[in-house]
Image (cartoon, rainbow, N blue to C red):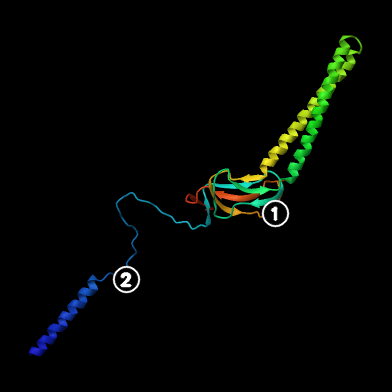
């Protein structure tokens, strides 16, 4: 009788446990949650955008040349620190020096012609004052002097221009920085007829960099 009683009690307990599980378990076909409630708060909204770019110095100077010519010397190389005004390269200046010599010779010739014209004018003015020659001839001498003066000024301008070009044969650094690119070698000919060729790239400070990129 005791065994029967214990078995019946166990069956009752198992039935009660199964009934409680069925009552408390959520239904599988319950509707999904439609709303969530939260307290209004302040925060940051972040969005990551993937992109690519090029790392460049903030200050990057292209060093070129204003005249054409053949590279005679290159004095700097990659990653070399330079100072403002330091000589980077030299162009062959023999043609410009020859042009300057020719212009200076023409200048001396024009000055001699001007001196002769001035002496002739002074002599003609003296003769005209005594009535030996006409005033028309004196005016011609005046025009000759003015023409000689104009030629002298023209030669002076040409000499100044060629001397400026001679100074341009020395390629110097415009800033303090580091050479990060060199695009010329000794013996190479550069042409500045249509656009200024780039000879060197100089970065002012490689610790101050920026990324040049395109973001969709």
Q: Position of residue 21 (x, y in %)?
A: 22, 74
Q: Residues within 10 Å of mark 2 (few under 14, many from 20)?
A: few
Which label belongs to residue 188?
Answer: 1
Q: Secondary structure at mark 2?
A: loop
Q: Position of residue 36 (x, y in %)?
A: 32, 57
Q: Residue at x 77, y 35 (%)?
A: 104
Is 119 situated left or right of 37 in this image? Answer: right
Q: Position of residue 91 (x, y in %)?
A: 68, 48
Marks 1 and 2, the one that precedes in the sequence: 2
Closest to the camera, between mark 1 and mark 2, is: 1
Is 75 situated left or right of 99 in this image? Answer: left
Q: Quadrant of residue 79?
A: bottom right
Which label belongs to residue 28?
Answer: 2
Q: Residue at x 61, y 54 (%)?
A: 182
Distance from the alpha carbon under mark 1 to that under mark 2:
84 Å
Which label belongs to residue 42?
Answer: none
Q: Residue at x 81, y 28 (%)?
A: 112
**Marks 1 and 2: CB-CB under 8 Å?**
no
Q: Residues within 10 Å of mark 1 (few under 14, many from 20)?
A: few
């Amino acid at each position: 009788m005791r065994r029967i009683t214990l078995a019946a009690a166990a069956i009752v307990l198992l039935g009660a446990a199964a009934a409680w599980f069925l009552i408390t378990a959520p239904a599988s076909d319950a509707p999904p949650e439609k709303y969530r409630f939260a307290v209004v708060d302040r925060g940051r909204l972040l969005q990551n955008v993937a992109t690519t770019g090029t790392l460049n110095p903030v200050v990057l100077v292209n060093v070129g040349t204003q005249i054409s010519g053949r590279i005679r010397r290159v004095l700097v190389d990659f990653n070399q620190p330079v100072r403002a005004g330091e000589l980077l390269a030299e162009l062959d200046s023999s043609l410009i020096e020859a042009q300057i010599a020719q212009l200076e010779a023409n200048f001396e010739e024009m000055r001699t012609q001007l001196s002769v014209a001035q002496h002739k004018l002074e002599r003609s003015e003296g003769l005209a004052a005594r009535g030996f020659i006409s005033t028309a001839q004196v005016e011609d001498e005046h025009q000759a002097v003015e023409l000689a003066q104009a030629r002298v000024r023209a030669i002076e301008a040409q000499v100044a221009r060629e001397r400026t070009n001679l100074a341009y044969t020395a390629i110097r650094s415009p800033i303090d920085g580091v050479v990060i690119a060199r695009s010329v070698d000794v013996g190479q000919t550069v042409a500045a007829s249509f656009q200024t060729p780039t000879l060197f790239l100089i970065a002012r400070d490689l610790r101050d960099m920026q990324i040049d990129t395109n973001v969709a």
